[in-house]
Amino acid sequence: MMAVRLYTIPAFLLLACTCCNPGEDTGDSSGLTSGKSVRIRGMLEQGAGKKVMLEEMGARELIPVDTVICDDAGCFEITFSPGEVAFYALRQDGPGYITLLIEPGESVEISGTYGKAHPYEIKGSRGSALLQELASEHKKTLDALAEISRMNRDLVSSPDYAKIKPRLDRQFDSLTADFTDYSLRFIHQHSGSLAILVALYNLYGQGIPVFSPDQHMDVYRYVDSALMSRYSGFEAVELLHAQIMEADRRLFQEKPFQKLRDGEIAPDFVSSQPNGEEMALSDLRGNYVLLSFWAGWSKLSRDENAYLKQAHNLYGEKPFRILQVSLDNEKETWIRAIEEDGLVWHHVSELKRWESAVAGLYHLEKIPSNVLIDPTGRIIAVDLFGNRLIERLNAIFDS
């Protein structure tokens, strides 16, 4: 299902561009940091006279941006004016490239050697620096896996191979498990960056994804919710969202009455608060959390808010938090309802009504709806309305 691949291991080497005087101005740089132009500078090892190409990485194709020739010292500089944040491939002739994630107005400097001992470094582009960090960890893992594969080939004819192979298999599984854990931490720590798309689509080898949709659909859903709240117009994000929606449609056809059940881990997500800042459900981990779905236009939701206020008044000073997810599509309606009802707790919304990624994540069919989550992140009850909610909270905090 998930066929988009935005990343490959860089194969050419870049060295410090001291001969290019990267700290000095080499021309009119007005607008590079305050405007929309982008400047990329670096130096290729033995790159004198060689071509360097920059291509924008679309979800389905590479789009040429510029081609330059390195000077006698191997230094190059590319200046262009992007319309919005995008992924780029920087490469020589031949396979492999360095993946960049560039915002308009950035001035990017690339130095170092891409390799196991001396990874390249990037300054002036936070997204590209994140990709460099991810690429470095990815390469370390791939190198270690390649060594295990080499040992396996060399020892396959050994009389002790039957004893050796399980040990090699355990080492392989341990390495992939460690990198999967690293990638998951990377995604959660940088949920506001498009760099997490690369972490989501990384491979251990041809046809071996770090995150398989069959086994890690919760990770795909988390990335979908995180990026749709900020980059809903970005092509690769829209494509991922469409794939998630199609998966949900098929899942509903196969299991139309599937619901989240007690004891399951509540799916994590990221969405936008009224002030524009992002918030994740996992930010409230360690508390009992009432995850409440509502909308300012829904009278039933507005009526239920009275019981949420009662719950907050009773247990707001306990390890109890309320996170309301609005299915409004107009911010004014959402904010007015919060103010009119006096809802003094956490609020998020994608302002997409039923097209919200979180609505699909929790299989919503109606509002109001709610999920009560324990401090470990597990669901302990669903759709506790009115006095039933108060009674359940009484049982938790008064026992």
Image (spheres, rainbow, N blue to C red):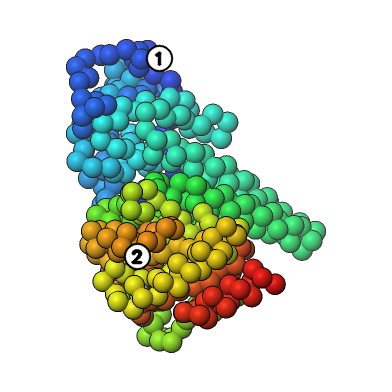
Label 1: state its secondary structure.
Answer: helix
In this picture, is 360 found above or below 59? below
Horizontal and vertical percent for residue 266?
Answer: 52, 68
In percent of width and height, residue 276 lies at 33, 49
Question: Taking the image as drawn, is residue 166 in sight?
Answer: yes
- Residues at marks 1 and 2 touching, judged by CB atoms closer than 8 Å: no
Q: Quadrant of the C terminus?
A: bottom right
Badge 1 amino acid: Thr
Residue at mark 1: 18
Residue 146, percent from left and from top: 59, 48
User: Dot 2: what SS?
Assistant: helix
Name the foreground residue: 382 vs 146. Answer: 382
Which one is nearer the viewer's eye here, 232 or 2?
232
Name the residue tied to disc 2: 341
Q: Quadrant of residue 131?
A: top left
Instruction: Report the front residue among 53 and 297.
Output: 297
- Say which amino acid is labelled 2: Asp
Give the Cα distance between marks 1 and 2: 61 Å
Residue at point 24%, 63% (across, down): 333
Q: Is residue 127 left or right of residue 117?
A: left
In the image, what residue occupies the spot 48% across and 51% down? 187
Q: Nearer the viewer, mark 1 or mark 2?
A: 2
In the image, 28: left or right of 237? left
Residue located 46% across and 56% down the image = 280
Label 2 crowd (10 A; few <14 / some 14-19 / many >=20)? some
Q: Is residue 201 above or below residue 50?
A: below
Note whether 178 is above or below 70 in the view shown.
below
